[in-house]
Image (tube, grey):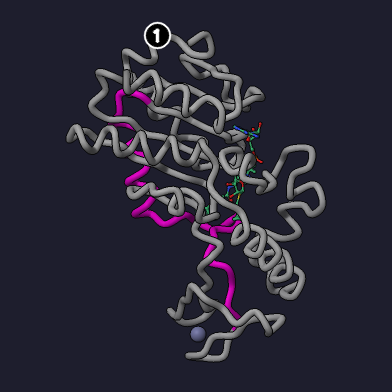
Amino acid sequence: MENFSTNLINKLKNANSVTVLTGAGVSAESGVPTFRDKDGLWNKFSPQDLANMNSFLKNTELVWEWYKWRKNLISNVSPNAGHYALSEMEEYYTNKGKKFTLITQNVDDLHKKSGSKNILELHGNIMRSRCIKCNYSTENMDNEKTIPTCIQCGNYLRPDVVWFGESLSEEILDKAFEEAENCDVFFSIGTSSLVYPAAMLPVHARDEDAYIVEINPERSALAYLFDEEINKKSGEILPEIMQELKK
Ligand code: BV8
Ligand code: ZN
């Protein structure tokens, strides 16, 4: 148990509520590139060029090409041990009538695919597309068309994700802050803690005296804030933590 403290395990055993925030790092071991790592998605393209509305309207084809490439990649990978450990952790607490909330910045389906139920998707979901004009949205899209269009009004469809400069769903964000502020232990896993307002969650958890833990092989921008830093891969360490918790 040298990778994490007995204190953490004791706190987890006595916790009534645990909240987890994940970022792209939890999907890295499934073969999904992160955004800002050296081999990350943003190295080939910059967020400014792709993940915002202006770029979408200016380079609709390029942006759709990028998202189709990502959707295809995500549909061909599976959850890793870290995802499964988090769905096991949710089961562990819900079976005891306690609270477990998974908040993710990720737009891939891997938490759902690994069995997690109570998920707050802060940045939307890449497998869903929606019309830029009317309220039409769909999970399956005809991939033939270079630029998918809405069957209701004929306008462009866009990926149902939150782009830079776009607000997150207020309802989801309020719920995420509430769960961060009302938990005994808060994990921030696989995120560079650079994107706001998601990066505010550990700060709020700490302000409300949660025990906050970062799991990331590198130190994130907010590493100094955490009560405990576990500089390991999530796919390796989460099963170990679950092992100890179940003892
Ligand atoms: C908003 C789209 C405002 C979906 C994404 C200046 C200062 C502060 C903030 C701002 C600023 N200027 C602008 C802003 C706001 C901006 C922002 O935060 N910018 C930052 C970058 C400076 N935020 C926004 O625009 C947000 N909206 O604020 O609206 C507003 C207010 C009122 C009215 C109107 C508007 C919207 C933010 C969402 C943007 N969308 N993506 C998509 O295509 O995916 S962001 C993108 O980054 C992804 O969504 C991703 O989830 C997110 C965070 O990245 P990470 O998940 O952390 O991934 P990253 O690669 O960075 O890090 C991976 C980590 O994993 C690394 O640390 C690595 O070490 C670790 N790792 C690697 N392997 C492993 C591992 N960890 C564990 N195990 C491993 N095996
Ligand atoms: Zn429409």
149 w.r.t. 196: above or below: below
**Residue located at (46% from left, 76% from top):** 137
Quadrant location, ligand no. 1 = top right
Viewport quadrant of the C terminus? top left
Determine the secondary structure under disc 1: helix
Q: Residue 204 in the image: x percent, y percent?
A: 39, 29
Name the residue located 50 percent from the left edge and 42 percent from the top edge: 197
Q: Quadrant of residue 56?
A: bottom right
Q: Nearer the viewer, residue 219 or 221?
A: 219
Q: Is residue 205 above or below residue 157?
A: above
Quarter occupied by residue 203: top left
- The verdict on residue 160 being magenta is yes
Give the residue drawn at x 74%, y 44%.
40
Provide residue 70's location: percent of width, then percent of height. Answer: 67, 60
Residue 225 falls left or right of residue 171: right
Locate residue 193, reporting x and y percent.
58, 34
Dot 1 corresponds to which residue?
6
Mark 1 neighbour class, 10 Å CA radius: few under 14, some 14 to 19, many 20 or more: few
Q: Is residue 196 above or below residue 98?
A: below
Asked if 41 appears above or below 184 in the picture, the reply is below
Q: Amino acid at mark 1?
A: Thr
Residue at the farthest left position: 97
Q: Is residue 39 shown left or right of residue 52? A: right
The segment highlighted magenta reads 156-185
Residue 129, position as x, y percentages in the image: 53, 72
- Is residue 207 rendered magenta in the image? no
Count of numbered marks: 1
